[in-house]
C-alpha cells in the first residue's frame, strides 16, 4: 500500500461496483509509470483524504480524482485520467470540448444504470499483489 503525498494522483472509485473495479484495472494496465494510486470511496483513506474538500462520501455517486491538491468528479475526472494513460485512449481527452453540463448529464445517466448493467459486489475482490501496492493507505 502507498502513503499519500501532495504529488499523488488518487482515483477514488465505488468499491461495490463491478464496472468501477474494472475501470481501476483498465487504468492500472495503461499506467506503467504508476502515476495513479487508488482507494475505494468506502475506505478509511477516502474519509481522511476527501474530508478537506468537504465531500460527504454518502452523497458521492461519482469517480473522484484528487490531483495536485484539487479534486475532480464525473466526466472531468474520467477525461483527466484518460489524458495520462498510455496508448491511443489518451486522445479521448479531446472530448473536453463538449460542455461539462452535457458530459456530466451522460455520466450521471450511465452511473444510475451501472449496477443494473454490470452488477454489484458485496464482498471485496482481492486484487493482485502488484495492483494492491498501488492502493492508498492513510
Image (cartoon, rainbow, N blue to C red):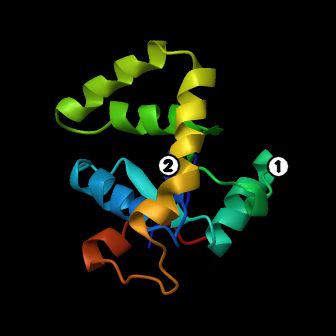
Q: Quadrant for residue 102, please give it.
A: top right
**Position of the C terminus by quadrant:** bottom right
Kindly state the secondary structure of the residue where label 1 is placed. loop
Q: Quadrant for residue 43, please give it.
A: bottom right
**Left or right relative to 86: residue 115:** right
- Provide residue 104's location: percent of width, then percent of height: 59, 32
Along the viewing direction, whichever of 129 and 61 lies nearer the viewer: 61
Q: Is residue 71 visible?
A: yes
**Position of the N terminus by quadrant:** bottom left
Kindly state the secondary structure of the residue where label 2 is placed. loop
Q: Residue at x 74, y 61 (%)?
A: 57
**In this rendering, which labeled residue sits more in front, label 2 or label 1?**
1
Sequence-wise, which precedes: disc 2 or disc 1?
2
- Provide residue 52's location: percent of width, then percent of height: 79, 50
Q: Residue at x 28, y 30 (%)?
A: 90
In this picture, is 102 found above or below 61? Answer: above
Q: Are marks 2 and 1 in contact (CB under 8 Å)?
A: no
Which label number is shown at residue 54? 1
The single residue placed furthest to the left in the displayed view is 87
Along the viewing direction, whichever of 27 and 132 lies nearer the viewer: 27
Q: Residue at x 43, y 32 (%)?
A: 79
**Left or right relative to 3: residue 59:** right
Q: Label 2 belongs to which residue?
A: 8
Q: Residue at x 28, y 54 (%)?
A: 26
In this picture, is 56 found above or below 47? Answer: above
Amino acid at each position: 500500500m502507498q502513503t499519500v503525498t501532495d504529488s499523488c494522483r488518487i482515483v477514488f472509485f465505488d468499491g461495490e461496483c463491478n464496472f468501477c473495479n474494472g475501470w481501476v484495472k483498465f487504468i492500472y494496465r495503461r499506467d506503467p509509470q504508476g502515476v495513479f494510486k487508488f482507494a475505494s470511496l468506502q475506505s478509511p483513506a477516502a474519509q481522511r483524504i476527501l474530508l478537506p474538500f468537504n465531500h460527504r462520501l454518502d452523497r458521492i455517486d461519482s469517480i473522484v480524482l484528487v490531483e495536485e491538491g484539487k479534486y475532480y468528479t464525473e466526466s472531468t475526472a474520467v477525461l483527466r485520467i484518460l489524458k495520462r494513460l498510455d496508448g491511443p485512449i489518451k486522445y479521448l481527452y479531446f472530448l473536453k470540448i463538449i460542455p461539462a453540463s452535457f458530459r456530466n448529464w451522460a455520466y450521471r445517466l450511465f452511473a444510475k444504470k451501472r449496477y443494473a448493467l454490470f452488477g454489484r459486489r458485496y464482498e471485496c475482490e482481492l486484487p493482485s499483489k502488484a495492483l494492491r501496492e498501488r492502493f492508498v493507505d492513510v
